[in-house]
Image: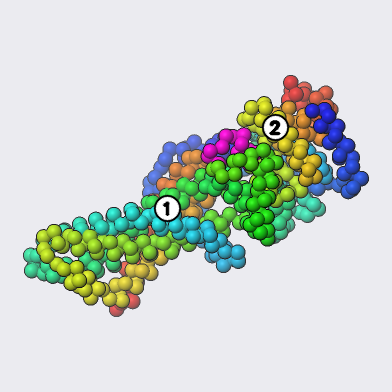
Amino acid sequence: MSKSKTQSVPAKKSNQISVYENLVERVTTGDTGEFFMEVAQLSKFTINFFKNLFRPSFEFRELMRQCYVAGYKSLSLVAITGFIMGVVLTIQTRPTLARFGAESLIPGMIAVSIVREIGPVITALICAGKIGSGIGAELASMKVTEQIDAMEVSGINPFKYLVVTRILSTTLMIPVLVIFADFIAFMGGFLGINILGDVGIRFYFTQIFNSLDYNDLMPAVIKTFFFGYFVGLVACYKGYTSNKGTEGVGQAANSAVVIGSLCIFVIDAIAVQLTSLLGK
Amino acid sequence: MEKVKEKKETDEEKDVKDTDKGPVMEITHLSKGFDAKQILKDINLTLNKGENLVVLGKSGTGKSVLIKCIVRLLEPDKGKIKVFGKDMSALKDTELNDMRKKIGFLFQHAALYDSMSVRDNLKFPLRVSDKTDKEKEDLVVEMLESVGLADAIDKMPSELSGGMQKRIGLARTMILKPEIILYDEPTTGLDPVTCKEISNLILEVQKKYKTSSIIITHDMECARTTSNRMVVMKEGVVVAEGTYKELQKSEDEWVRSFFE
Ligand SMILES: Nc1ncnc2c1ncn2[C@@H]1O[C@H](COP(=O)(O)OP(=O)(O)OP(=O)(O)O)[C@@H](O)[C@H]1O
Ligand SMILES: [Mg+2]
């Protein structure tokens, strides 16, 4: 099987072109047909997802397992980056604020920047790297080794079992991870402040929660669900539709991360526009 | 070996009396291509009840494509596939799934789910059945015993040898008690002793569960032991048909060359 599949790979595509270059190349050479094909296929994939989502016989156990893999197994990574984020942000902004004698604003500044922007985006990017690549590679290798076909012929719907559960797990877990990372980042910020100053923990957290309001929290939380959804969707799409043998496994993992990260920035840009429009 | 064959034949004769021995699968004018390349051109094939049909053909002639078309892993371009009198391409999703449960498929490379233990691999096809956990467990043990690997139940696929994986794959295929089994090169890449074991297993399955099977193989020893009838494929069409003995004495030199 693998033999026949590797044979079917056109030679010119075998060198790994990164997705960005590929996009640029397609647009510049006018070969946009393939790009739109891909968009059409992704839309079909999305429709399939929602169709299967509401079909009965819910794969609850597999969903729990995927949540465990996506959520619990990323905790330590997210915690470390969150903590460093907090420390670094505090230390970096301190001199500027000190110049204006506004050191007491540091907790508020940390709170707003972490909750609104840095927490969600950095955490989602890390998840795109860790969870997205994992899903992409796993599904692609299941495809190569005919495991997905095997599910299909035994009368089980592989889309429901593999794809729906994975997309749901990232949609649900990335927001949780973001909140967790935000909290750890606050702890990091507390440490950062206390390297040079002396601020009590109660005062610090009172400051933080006082400076956050509904308008900071809600949009941030809502956009993390979209981050999660798109990280899962892109990774599953790339993995599930991969068909280039072993080479496809690497490509699927690669594009899951690259396109997933790109999606995060695009959603972030849209979200910021929407919130500033609605906030008026 | 001869004894086994004789016994099987008498068994089959009994079958003939029990049930009318009509075809369980009919393939007519099947064609399938990829891009510009035509792989299957005009395949006509019938599989009768209770028989083992061996499909011979050079590597890359589209034997795997043929059986993938049967279970609709690939959509045929033209032609009709009727299984138990029903047109496969007309089936709706749920009907197709029910039909697929009656057709076992043994993949060329076993295709075990490598994130699951052997037990969970075998239980997987049963997840939508209404059996209790106890019944499922018993069935798993029964199937593993029938392929002689009862002690591998808690192993992961990566801990198994190629031959063991094939046998576990067969057990997983068998667990839904399919009426038709499609074997894709069940013995390729295995040592002669294991090949013989698998061939015997195929015969046993045929006898015990009264299955009808299509067996794709390059292994002439396997073909000789398991086949009731054989067909030879060349360049997308069926070029010869007959029993092992008949084809061995075929006038076509190309067909004969398989047997040398
Ligand atoms: N998904 C696919 N896309 C494009 N071409 C394919 C695909 N699957 C199979 N082919 C082509 O179809 C031809 C037949 O493949 P197939 O796997 O059926 O051969 P086979 O007869 O089973 O060979 P082998 O004995 O080596 O397994 C090959 O030339 C292969 O390149
Ligand atoms: Mg093959």
The amino acid type found where label 2 is placed reads: Glu
Where on the picture, by quarter, is residue A263? bottom left
Gap between marks 2 and 1 measured at Cα? 43 Å
The quarter of the image that holds ligand 1 is: top right
Secondary structure beneath dot 1 equals helix
- Quarter of the image where the N terminus of chain A is located: top right
Q: Is residue B5 left or right of residue A102?
A: right
Q: Which residue is mark 1?
A: A132
- Position above or below: B118 against A271: above
Which residue is nearer to you in this view: A10 or B197? B197
User: Which residue: 43% across, 64% down?
Assistant: A172
Check the residue under mark 1 and report the chain it is in: A
Q: Is residue B186 left or right of residue A99?
A: right
Position of residue B5 measured from the top left corner of the image (x, y, whole percent): 83, 32
Q: Is residue A232 left or right of residue B8?
A: left
Q: Is residue A168 left or right of residue A111?
A: right
Q: Which residues are magenta?
A: B157-168
Which residue is nearer to you in this view: A131 or B38? A131
Q: Looking at the magenta stretch, what is its main secondary structure? A: helix
In contact (CB < 8 Å): disc 2 and disc 1: no
Q: Which residue is mark 2?
A: B197
User: Which residue: 89% across, 40% down?
Assistant: B13
